[in-house]
Amino acid sequence: MSYDLIVIGTGPGGYVAAIRAAQLGLKTAVVEKRKTHGGTCLNIGCIPSKALLHASHMFQDAQHFADMGIGVSAPTLDLAKMLSFKQEGVEGNTKGVEFLLKKNKIDAFIGHARIAAVGQVEVTGEDGSNQMLETKNIVIATGSDVTRLPGIEIDEKVIVSSTGALELESVPKRLVVIGAGVIGLELGSVWRRLGAEVTVVEYLDRILPGMDGEVAKNFQRILGKQGFQFKLGSKVTGVERTANGATLTVEPAAGGTPETIEADVVLVAIGRVPYTQGLGLDHVGVQLDNRGRIQTDAHFSTNITGIYAIGDVIAGPMLAHKAEDEGVAVAEIIAGKAGHVNYDVIPSVVYTFPEVASVGKTEEELKAAGIAYNAGKFPFTANGRAKVNRTTDGFVKILADASTDKVLGVHIVGPEAGNLIHEAAIAMEFGASSEDMARTCHAHPTLAEAVKEAALAVEKRAIHM
Ligand SMILES: Cc1cc2nc3c(=O)[nH]c(=O)nc-3n(C[C@H](O)[C@H](O)[C@H](O)COP(=O)(O)OP(=O)(O)OC[C@H]3O[C@@H](n4cnc5c(N)ncnc54)[C@H](O)[C@@H]3O)c2cc1C
Ligand SMILES: NC(=O)c1ccc[n+]([C@@H]2O[C@H](COP(=O)([O-])OP(=O)(O)OC[C@H]3O[C@@H](n4cnc5c(N)ncnc54)[C@H](O)[C@@H]3O)[C@@H](O)[C@H]2O)c1
């Protein structure tokens, strides 16, 4: 078989690239080694974690229905049912991708892809069968894998990665999370809400590195109120399996006396690494960077003509929507159009309660770059809708250039932050000033009024504060 484009991997990067290419008239095929499409995101990432975050949030909310005068008996947990609720959501989504591939007349091969030569992809099926496909272009969208701690074996039962943490058969009494990044805090929240004591051990002296420091500090305090324990500035030097769980050895990051912590389950959530195993990259001469990511130019082209790469396997934030936008852009470039991704305006959301959301530069980044800015902040305690809903933790912060007033960054910790951030993203995409955001009429009573008030606060003229 001969194609214009073969995409390797059907995660958010790969399947979106294939659909856009087919829309543009390219004869397109995908190769995926899992039995289902959708990649990490739909199978073992974004989608199952959000299903469990939603269900566990409902479980916790139900315990407060009486505050609103709703009489229900105390909620009970059927974990097996909750896990099947999650799995049904996953299947709904992965089947949706299968449908979209068919609808767009994209040939889908299930098997392991190896680039045999420029323009040739070899597909090996589970049964060992081999097939050689010819193509003018290849897009590598093979994603990422869990980062492992040296000497600590992940068994996905007691010592788990995010994959095992989405499948625990019972609620652990004591869950220790290694890494206070997005996965640690999202999946830590799931099990905390369902009853686990959660301790998070983090190497740095703060949580959520990369997010705005003030937001992270405020969010840590909120999680503390929810019962999270934090051991910051601490490194795990060993994890030993015991009869019923595991013992962790933890020392101060700067060195010092080690201590031990007992856990029923340990979640290793210290990041992800690009996945290029078995692709044959050495063989065709595709270059990697010093962090094992496929090196690409501004048009997603590798050093080999006709071979492109997108998503988690290249540089940039490991986010599904970043991979999707790159998928659209690379297909457009291959089809001879002008595909482009604006990396200055990629929102990032932590789907805890409350949510944390961010787009653009943090205060730390602006200070480091020597850019003068004005900050406007508005707390949810002063927002009418948040007050009646009793979800007043958090604030909106808008950072605007001191001389031009152009919005450079927006950071939110609070209810619905993940939805609210998009008005900021659109404003930034169009180069808006904080005054533009402040002059835009916002419906009352909405949480979004906090965004407008934060914009007004840039010029110190917020009304409700
Ligand atoms: C627990 C968890 C929660 C997450 N939640 C979010 C979230 O809420 N929002 C968000 O934006 N991001 C989230 N992410 C990150 C998100 O999943 C990734 O950024 C996204 O999946 C990257 O997409 P991708 O297409 O680059 O790669 P992937 O989704 O990893 O897909 C790559 C695919 O390539 C296949 N593959 C690899 N090698 C081969 C080969 N040789 N032959 C054939 N197929 C191959 C793999 O099987 C896989 O299906 C989460 C990740 C995790 C682990
Ligand atoms: N909501 C989302 O968008 C979402 C959700 C889940 C995952 N993801 C993506 O998946 C990727 C992986 O997530 P993650 O949470 O594993 O990584 P991360 O990079 O977000 O966080 C890892 C944390 O582990 C810490 N750490 C590293 N080594 C350590 C050690 N030895 N001991 C203690 N702490 C250590 C780091 O300092 C960091 O705080 C991220 O890039 C993220 O973008 C996104």
Image: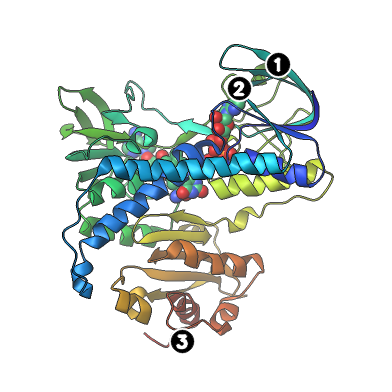
Q: Residues within 10 Å of mark 1 (few under 14, many from 20)?
A: some
Residue 112: numbered disc: none
- Residue 155 in view: yes
Q: Please tell me which of labels 1 and 2 falls first in the chain.
A: 2
Q: Please tell me which of labels 3 and 1 falls first in the chain.
A: 1
- Ligand 1 closer than 8 Å to label 1 CB: no
Q: Residue at x 31, y 74 (%)?
A: 389
Residue in front for this viewpoint, 236 or 415: 415
Quickly name the residue at label 1. Answer: 131
Separation of marks 1 and 2 at Cα, in angstroms: 10 Å
Quickly name the residue at label 2. Answer: 111
User: Where residue 253 appears, x then y in whole percent?
Assistant: 29, 37
Q: Which picture quadrant has residue 17? A: top right
Question: Residue lying furthest right in this view?
Answer: 336
* In this rendering, the label closer to the viewer, 3 or 1: 1
Mark 3 is on which residue type?
A: Arg
Separation of marks 3 and 1 at Cα, in angstroms: 67 Å
User: Where residue 448 appears, x then y in whole percent?
Assistant: 47, 75
Name the secondary structure under disc 3.
Answer: loop
* In this rendering, the label closer to the viewer, 3 or 2: 2
- Ligand 1 closer than 8 Å to label 2 CB: yes
